[in-house]
């Protein structure tokens, strides 16, 4: 690939991740029908953020990815089926494509978490093998496809994030660099959703703490 790929939306990266994942976990059903692809995009497990994707939204993402030659359409019986060209278009080995798929589906992960999450698609020998492929993706002459985020206080490993969807907000307040452009609206919406969820959880914990303190007859912290 001679030039950096245009920034993909959250849904476009989800579609690609699902196609790469299902190619290896359910090969008998691959290429996928639109219904199967929508189900994979909307499933509640192994996805972050969790999305509710309609047929029309998935079809629009497919059509966009087809313009980059990342997805091919074929006819199988009475329905269309879809397959990815990810490895060939981006010129990455299958192991790297699998790592990117997990990052597109689950969000930032440590090398150890990636090794476990990839087990159904590829068995990496050890964490250093995972890191070797990640470092290659981060140092590509045509543009990095992953970046390593700053290590959180107390964490043993730094997390890795994919850059196909644009710049990634670092947890310590910096932004990972990517030449493809700004974050998509879908990513911003996902981040706002996560913030709202966390705020709700904090509110619930505060309410629980107040009740416990009241029952024990002590004053809770301000």
Image (cartoon, helix red, strand yellow):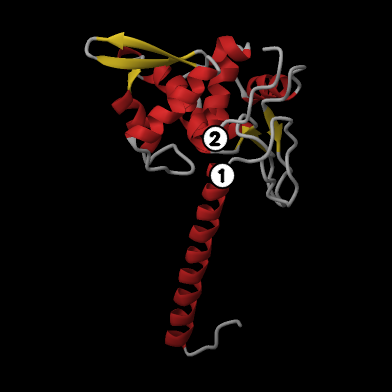
Q: Residue at x 36, y 27 (%)?
A: 37
Quadrant occupied by the C terminus: bottom right
| Above or below 162: residue 88 | above
Give the quarter of the image for residue 47: top left
Across and down, in percent, residue 130 comes to: 63, 23
Which residue is disc 2 drawn over? Answer: 9
Q: Nearer the viewer, residue 93 or 168?
A: 168
**Callout 1: helix, strand or loop?**
helix
What is the C-alpha distance between the residues marked 2 and 1? 8 Å
Q: Residue at x 34, y 19 (%)?
A: 32
Quadrant occupied by the N terminus: top right
Marks 2 and 1 in Cβ contact (< 8 Å): yes
Q: Nearer the viewer, residue 8 or 17?
A: 8
Which residue is disc 1 drawn over? Answer: 185
Across and down, in percent, residue 54 comes to: 34, 37
Across and down, in percent, residue 177 comes to: 75, 36
């Amino acid at each position: 690939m001679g030039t950096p790929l245009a920034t993909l939306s959250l849904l476009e990266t989800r579609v690609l991740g699902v196609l790469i994942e299902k190619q290896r976990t359910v090969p008998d059903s691959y290429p996928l029908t639109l219904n199967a692809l929508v189900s994979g995009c909307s499933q509640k497990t192994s996805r972050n953020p969790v999305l509710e994707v309609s047929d029309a939204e998935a079809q629009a993402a497919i059509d966009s990815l087809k313009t980059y030659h990342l997805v091919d359409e074929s006819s199988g019986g009475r329905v269309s089926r879809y397959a990815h060209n990810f490895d060939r278009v981006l010129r990455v080995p299958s192991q790297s494509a699998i790592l990117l798929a997990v990052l597109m589906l689950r969000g930032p992960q440590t090398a150890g978490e990636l090794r476990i999450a990839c087990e159904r698609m590829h068995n990496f020998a050890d964490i250093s093998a995972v890191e070797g492929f990640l470092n290659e993706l981060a140092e590509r002459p045509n543009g990095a496809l992953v970046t390593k985020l700053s290590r959180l206080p107390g964490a043993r490993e730094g997390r890795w994030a994919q850059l196909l969807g644009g710049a990634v907000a670092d947890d310590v307040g910096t932004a990972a660099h990517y030449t493809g452009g700004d974050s998509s609206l879908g990513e911003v919406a996902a981040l706002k959703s996560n913030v709202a969820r966390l705020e709700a959880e904090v509110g619930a914990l505060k309410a629980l703490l107040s009740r416990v303190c009241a029952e024990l007859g002590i004053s809770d912290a301000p």
